[in-house]
Amino acid sequence: MNLQKLKEAEAEFLRRYPGGFENPEMVEIGKKHRVPKMSEFAHESFAPEKFHNVDQTLAAMVSAVSRSSMVSMFEKPRFKDFVKVLDDTEKEALTSALYEQLHGDQQRGFELMVGMLQSNKVAKWTLMTIIPFYYKPKDEVFVKPMTTKGVIKTLDLDLAYKPLPSWDFYRRYRDIIGELKDKVDPSLTISNAAFTGFMMMSM
């Protein structure tokens, strides 16, 4: 972990944008991602009691992915098409996997969802992590491949990125991001995506 590079990036970012993500220019950039609004939607749609209605939960999953500015335009229709062809058993399994990710055994839910998405060739990091991030934006990490690989390389992190999502990588990356956030100005850590975004802009 190269903390010197982190501190250099922090100093340069705050020089360019005094106040960090409260800087007016950064506020304008942040508006297009609508993280607070998407987080509110996630809390309304994926509260524990909402999972009793499987079809409603699936519709909310598709909506969260479709409305996200952080998921690529190529992945959105693929996820929607994937959900569209699920049978009743698969629908139950997918919503159960998300429930576990958000409210139960997170590792089990993560691995169940990877298995389902992988079998349909849509096991992408962005699709795996966008809803948990929106639900807990200060705790969970959004894994965007280019940004994640850049953070690992820039800070010399002891992590090996692989395209297929894995719980071990996710857990370790999340823990490291948590450690790094504690070492910079709070104005750079309004959410985990904002923090990794600061790193991306500083590379």
Image (cartoon, rainbow, N blue to C red):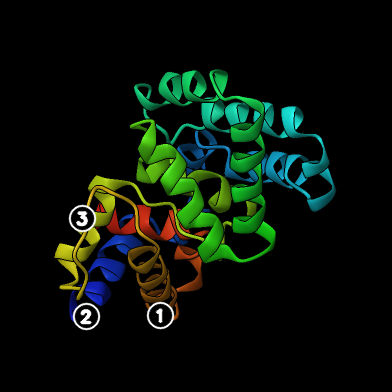
Residue at 50% x, 51% y: name it.
112
Q: Quadrant of the N terminus?
A: bottom left
Q: Sequence-wise, which precedes: disc 3 or disc 1?
A: 3
Marks 3 and 1: CB-CB under 8 Å?
no
Q: Quadrant of the C terminus?
A: bottom left
**x and y, in percent, of residue 8 in the image:** 21, 72
Q: Residues within 10 Å of mark 3 (few under 14, many from 20)?
A: some
Asked whether, in this view, residue 42 is left or right of residue 67, the answer is right
Q: Residues within 10 Å of mark 2 (few under 14, many from 20)?
A: some
Asked whether, in this view, residue 54 is left or right of residue 91, the answer is right
Q: Which residue is labeled 1 in the image?
A: 179
CA separation in Å, label 2 and label 1: 10 Å
Q: Sequence-wise, which precedes: disc 2 or disc 1?
A: 2
Looking at the picture, which amino acid does disc 2 mark? Answer: Met
Residue at 33% x, 32% y: name it.
121
In the structure shown, which secondary structural element does the residue marked by tag 3 occupy? helix
Q: In the rendering, which numbered label is found on residue 149?
A: 3
Looking at the picture, which amino acid does disc 3 mark? Answer: Lys
Q: In the rendering, which numbered label is found on residue 1?
A: 2
**x and y, in percent, of residue 36 in the image:** 64, 45
CA separation in Å, label 2 and label 3: 14 Å
Picture layout, residue 66 above or below residue 53: above
Marks 2 and 3: CB-CB under 8 Å?
no
Asked whether the viewer can see residue 146, the reply is yes
Residue at 46% x, 58% y: name it.
141
Q: Residues within 10 Å of mark 1 (few under 14, many from 20)?
A: few
In the structure shown, which secondary structural element does the residue marked by tag 1 occupy? helix
Marks 2 and 1: CB-CB under 8 Å?
yes
Q: Sequence-wise, which precedes: disc 2 or disc 3?
A: 2
Looking at the picture, which amino acid does disc 1 mark? Answer: Glu
**x and y, in percent, of residue 133 in the image:** 54, 52
Picture layout, residue 134 above or below residue 161: above
